[in-house]
Image (cartoon, coloured by chain):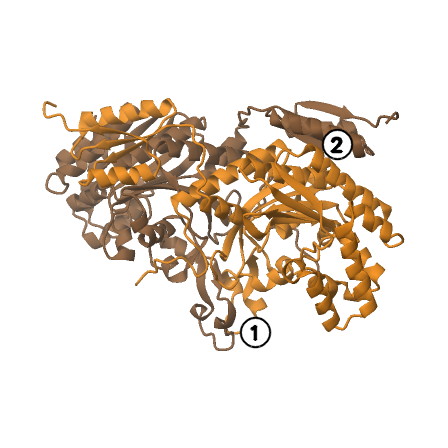
Chain colours: A brown, B orange
Amino acid sequence: MALSKKPVTGMKDILPAEMQIRDYVIGVIKDTYGDFGFTPIETPCMENIENLSSKQGGENEKLIFKVLKRGEKLNLETAKTEADLVDTGLRYDLTVPLVRFYSNNASQLPTPFKALQIGNVWRADRPQRGRYRQFMQCDIDILGEPSNLAEIELILATTTTLGKLGFKDFQIRINERRILKAMAAYSGFSEENYDTVFIILDKMDKIGLDGVATELESSGFDKTSIDKYVALFKGVDNAQNGVAYLAHELVGFLEKEVEESLAEIIESVETTKAAKFEIIFDPTLVRGMSYYTGTIFEISIPEFGGSCGGGGRYDKMVGNFTGSDVPACGFSIGFERIVLLLLESGFQIPTESKKIAYLLEKGIAGKALCNVIEEAQNARKNGEKVLVVRMNKNKKFQKEQLIQQGYEEFKEFYNDPLN
Amino acid sequence: MALSKKPVTGMKDILPAEMQIRDYVIGVIKDTYGDFGFTPIETPCMENIENLSSKQGGENEKLIFKVLKRGEKLNLETAKTEADLVDTGLRYDLTVPLVRFYSNNASQLPTPFKALQIGNVWRADRPQRGRYRQFMQCDIDILGEPSNLAEIELILATTTTLGKLGFKDFQIRINERRILKAMAAYSGFSEENYDTVFIILDKMDKIGLDGVATELESSGFDKTSIDKYVALFKGVDNAQNGVAYLAHELVGFLEKEVEESLAEIIESVETTKAAKFEIIFDPTLVRGMSYYTGTIFEISIPEFGGSCGGGGRYDKMVGNFTGSDVPACGFSIGFERIVLLLLESGFQIPTESKKIAYLLEKGIAGKALCNVIEEAQNARKNGEKVLVVRMNKNKKFQKEQLIQQGYEEFKEFYNDPLN
């Protein structure tokens, strides 16, 4: 049978040059998040299909790769719907699995629990350049910490990681779902329309404030509400301190505690940050997922249009599994985008050990072979990376290839006619 | 909707204590194999279903998790067979994906190509204690190296890794498919029966030589052949040098080159090994997969009954994809078993940096919070791992939990009433 050389549609093979960068980024992530007390965990790549279809995942639930039931359970003749055929699917994110994991293992986990997850997720998106159907996500989450210490530590850990990877002059944009809601309430939108309003607001970076106003109008919203809403955003733009301005304007609509907490996060991060970035309040930040209940934040890297990661507080999601809520807050770093940016920038990984290639003439065997390998073993013990290979006919080309792979030194071994 | 807290049947959540060991083992593997010039690669977890059903995978092909076609391609009404519903599956090993990867990317890869793969595979085995339907495999392979330098480097790299993980007094058992065949031919078995004979021989460690003889007899094989076969194995047992003994006995059935190459592998490894183990010739070693064409080998660890990894030469498999053969040899280390052995032995990971927990009284906020976080940030810059958490009501229990997580030092911060 003819076998297919190509990977599955929309997925990709990862070659050594990219793998090196990926492994390096994963190493920095694990080390840095480890310094902040995050501990790695892992869940299976598959989840029960009910968990994946529980409306936690928004649009991603339409993109699930579903896995056929195994064994006798499968009956194609009587199967009427997909549900008769399928009982699991590949996860589309790491948040739903984390919350299930926490619900399943809470008795064995410390409070608060600081989790680090690095793993693949799958989404059957339309294949397009730079977007793949299998990609890696990298999430940190703190469960069981109600105070803004969670937000502060998440933002510091993530930005320290980005700094160590060489990124600078980036931005953390931060907002609060309760500010979004208070602004909408103050303007006179009714609660059942909030989601529609926020979806339009979310287009701000593409269509601008005027565009948002126009679209709100064409969606049939009241002109007075729209004017009040637009005035608020303009007010923030002109204010020295956006959070304080809004807190003043929104009296009666916004709890004092929201203002204080957000100001505290921004100040703590600004004061103690270990990378070159700024944290700014952005009342236009929406973030899609409906499960957020409080703070939301996003990374913007100037080299890269659009978000390079984000997260927020989701205090109600554990309750969906266990019946009782647990405060939770998470930050997902855009792993694939970061790898892409490093690859495109020609990023060189700092290496410590010397890479040497031993080239052996064909025919070196027996005692002579032993001697070469012994020499390689000794060099490895001394911390060198040693590749032992047969000399190709075209030695010059072989060396060029090896130089591309990072080998700096060559040693050639020939048959000793006296041997 | 009620959500399920449990992982998918037969799969497991990995908690921090085990993850720490897993990450440590992966680190040692990557470092050590890197010293030998192996470069990491990755392939998608899914493969086209034809590639997974091409008879390369033996019994594993019955255990595939199949993935439903996506989008308009799926029509449940007209679907008659699984093939109408399914176009991909989750990989059951890393060898088939590697060979596809090599066929797809050969022009961009050096010769020889030394690949390291660490990744999950899925098999719908009957769930049982210690065996899971998702598990990690860790393979090294050398493609494009016809000489036994491949075998020597694979065995040295794998055993050096085991040594660094603290294993000693283990065995590498080695054999050659061509010796297996020559022994069968010499004894008078006909070629179409080789596979049946080898399946029975493979039970040697369970039923002994007498048991093998009995089973061969009850399978209807000729008594003369069985006697000659049994005598050969006894001869090896009594011989000082099993390989030389067989080479002498099997003259006319076994190429001289096989004896020389095997002897060279054993001597090179014995002379240059960097761990405490022995490599022994074992003519009863079969290894199941039919794709092996030459040397085969397996790791036996005394603490663990049974194999802890293995591999061999498979020179014909790339040809199935490309039409032209490429010499190939691989070694798969039993990752999950090694993790299990380390967990059960109470293995302690060598750590370099101090782990400190800062306990903050509830209510510490504003400037005081900034100061604590600043102190933590400075300690992290100095290489310490610092967890910043709110003090729980039961501080004693909280500290006990933290000690279990490896925190050796505590620092407590209280509200300053003068602040």
Subunit of mark 1?
B
- Crowding at mark 2 (Cα within 10 Å: few <14, some 14-19, many 20+): many
Q: Please state the horizontal and vertical placement of residue B122, each as a whole percent of the image.
A: 53, 56
* As drawn, B381 above or below A51: above
Pointer 2 and pointer 1 on the same chain: no
Query: Quadrant of the rendered structure where residue B408 is?
Result: top left
Whether residue B179 sits left or right of residue A354 in the image: it is right
* As drawn, B180 above or below B402: below
- Crowding at mark 1 (Cα within 10 Å: few <14, some 14-19, many 20+): few
Judge by depth and name the residue closer to the eye, B375 or B84.
Answer: B375
Q: Please state the horizontal and vertical placement of residue A313, each as a whole percent of the image.
A: 27, 43
Residue at x 39% of width, y 43% of height? B16
Instruction: From the image, tell me which residue sits under label 2.
Output: A370
Q: Which amino acid does label 2 sit on?
A: Cys
Q: Residue B142 carries which label?
A: none
Can residue B39 be seen? yes
Instruction: From the image, tell me which residue sits under label 1.
Output: B80
Q: Which amino acid does label 1 sit on?
A: Lys
Quarter of the rendering occupied by the N terminus of chain B: bottom left
* As drawn, B161 above or below B290: above
**Extreme residue in the front direction:** B238
Quarter of the rendering occupied by the C terminus of chain B: top left
Q: Please state the horizontal and vertical placement of residue B174, each as a whole percent of the image.
A: 70, 47
